[in-house]
Image: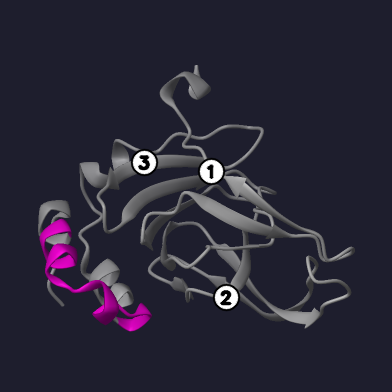
């Protein structure tokens, strides 16, 4: 296995035509990324209220973030509005859930149900294709650190309410240094 620096990763991603970028290709590249150095350490910031979304790199082709989770932190049930996602566990245990549509009570609603749940340790991957619906959580008693690559850059998500089927587009924000002071 080769180990890419962040610069190597950016160069590799720039050489792949967008239509040729598939989830297996993104998985391979994210797996080859060297995460032992400052790429990770400089972006580890935790918050007690919610998981943090710490930007490592953004290009027109992809975003890379480090997410830091305290025990009990969980995302909404959401999709990525057409972006591919490879999430790599760096430290701790990630609970990854995939949901499937379970009915459409109205044109602007979509009920979802749990289809699959995995617990992943360091080096494990959660992969989400362009149209999949998922949720991530730290259901352990230890802190969790994950690396996320989104291709195309992730600006919005579509959040699903499993009880009512309501869907809401949400614009994402990064955690900023002042959030940790």
Identify the mark nearer the N-term, 1 or 3: 3
Query: Who comes first in sequence, dot 1 or dot 2?
Result: 2
> Which is nearer the eye, 65 or 101?
101
Q: Does residue 71 sit above or below 22 in this rendering?
A: above
Q: Nearer the viewer, residue 69 or 129?
A: 129
The residue at 25%/55% (across/down) is: 35
Decide whether residue 22 is among the magenta residues. Answer: yes
Nearer the viewer's eye, disc 3 or disc 2? 2
Q: In 3D space, how far apart are the residues under numbered discs 1 and 2 (Cα atoms)?
A: 18 Å
Q: CA distance from mark 3 to mark 2?
A: 23 Å
**Residue hosting label 3:** 55
Nearer the camera: disc 1 or disc 3: 1
Q: Which residues are magenta?
A: 10-24
Q: Is residue 20 magenta?
A: yes
Dot 3, how many residues are within 10 Å of its Cα: few (below 14), some (14-19), or many (20+)?
A: some
Please tell me whether mark 3 sits on a helix, a strand or a loop: strand
Q: Residue at x 62, y 68 (%)?
A: 134
Mark number, residue 172: 1
Name the residue beneath numbered marker 2.
Answer: 132
Q: Residues within 10 Å of mark 1 (few under 14, many from 20)?
A: few
Quadrant in the picture for the N terminus: bottom left
Residue 144 percent across, percent down from the top left: 52, 51
* Place of residue 77 in the rendered image (x, y in percent of width and height, measured from the top left): 69, 61
Q: Position of residue 98 (x, y in %)?
A: 64, 75
| Label 1: element kind | loop
What x and y, as percent, mark residue 60? Answer: 26, 52
């Amino acid at each position: 296995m080769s180990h890419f620096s962040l610069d190597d990763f950016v160069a590799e991603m720039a050489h792949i035509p967008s239509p040729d970028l598939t989830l297996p290709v993104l998985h391979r590249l994210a797996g080859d990324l060297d995460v032992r150095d400052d790429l990770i350490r400089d972006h580890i910031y935790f918050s007690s209220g919610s998981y943090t979304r710490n930007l490592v790199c953004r290009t027109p082709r992809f975003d890379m973030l480090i997410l830091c989770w305290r025990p009990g932190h969980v995302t909404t049930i959401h999709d990525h509005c057409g972006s591919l996602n490879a999430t790599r566990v760096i430290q701790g245990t990630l609970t990854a859930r995939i949901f499937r549509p379970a009915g459409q009570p109205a044109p602007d609603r979509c009920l979802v149900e749990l289809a699959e749940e995995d617990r992943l340790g360091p080096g494990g991957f959660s992969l989400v294709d362009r149209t999949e619906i998922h949720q991530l959580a730290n259901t352990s008693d230890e802190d969790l650190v994950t690396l996320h690559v989104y291709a195309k850059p992730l600006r919005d998500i579509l959040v699903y309410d499993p009880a009512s089927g309501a869907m809401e587009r949400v614009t994402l924000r990064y955690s900023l240094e002042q959030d940790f002071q």
